[in-house]
C-alpha cells in the first residue's frame, strides 16, 4: 500500500468515526430533525419563501 493510499484510508476512517459521533448527538435524532424541519416549514409561509434549516456539527 502506498503512502497516499494509507492517508486516504486513515482519512476515511476519521470521517466515518466523526459521522457516527454526529449521529449520536441529541440534536441530530430523527425526531429532533423532523421537529426542526416542521418548524422551518411553518416559518417559511407563504410557500414562496425558501425553507431554512440550520444544521451544525
Image: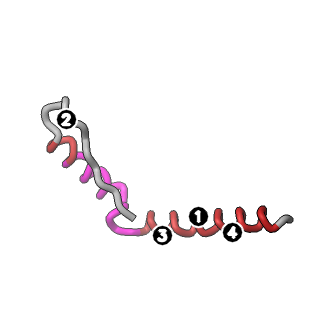
Marks 3 and 2, how far apart in space?
A: 33 Å
Marks 4 and 3, how far apart in space?
A: 17 Å
Decide whether the magenta segment is chiefly helix, strand or loop: helix
Magenta stretch encompasses residue 37: yes
Cβ–Cβ under 8 Å for marks 3 and 1: no
Q: Which of the two labelled residues, at mark 4 and mark 3, occupies the earlier sequence position?
A: 4
Toward the viewer: 51 or 34? 51
Residue 22 rendering spot, x and y as whole percentages = 44, 66
Toward the viewer: 4 or 50? 4
| Secondary structure category for the residue under label 2 | loop
Colour scheme of the picture: secondary structure
Highlighted range, magenta: 25-39
Magenta stretch encompasses residue 14: no
Q: Which of the two labelled residues, at mark 4 and mark 1, occupies the earlier sequence position?
A: 4
Q: In this rendering, is residue 19 above or below 50?
A: below
The residue where tag 3 is placed is: 21
Cβ–Cβ under 8 Å for marks 4 and 3: no
Q: Which of the two labelled residues, at mark 1 and mark 2, occupies the earlier sequence position?
A: 1
The residue where tag 4 is placed is: 10
Task: Tell me the residue at 34%/68% (across/down).
Answer: 26
Horizontal side of 12 relative to 22 (left or right) equals right
Marks 3 and 1, how far apart in space?
A: 9 Å
| Secondary structure category for the residue under label 4 | helix
- Which quadrant does the C terminus fall into? bottom left
Cβ–Cβ under 8 Å for marks 1 and 2: no
Q: In this rendering, is residue 45 above or below 12?
A: above
Residue 39 rendering spot, x and y as whole percentages = 19, 48
The residue where tag 1 is placed is: 16
The residue where tag 2 is placed is: 49
Between tags 4 and 3, which lies in front? 4
Residue 3 rendering spot, x and y as whole percentages = 80, 68
Amino acid at each position: 500500500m502506498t503512502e497516499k493510499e494509507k492517508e486516504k484510508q486513515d482519512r476515511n476512517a476519521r470521517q466515518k468515526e466523526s459521522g457516527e459521533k454526529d449521529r449520536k448527538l441529541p440534536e441530530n435524532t430523527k425526531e429532533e430533525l423532523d421537529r426542526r424541519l416542521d418548524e422551518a416549514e411553518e416559518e417559511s409561509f407563504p410557500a414562496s419563501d425558501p425553507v431554512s434549516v440550520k444544521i451544525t456539527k
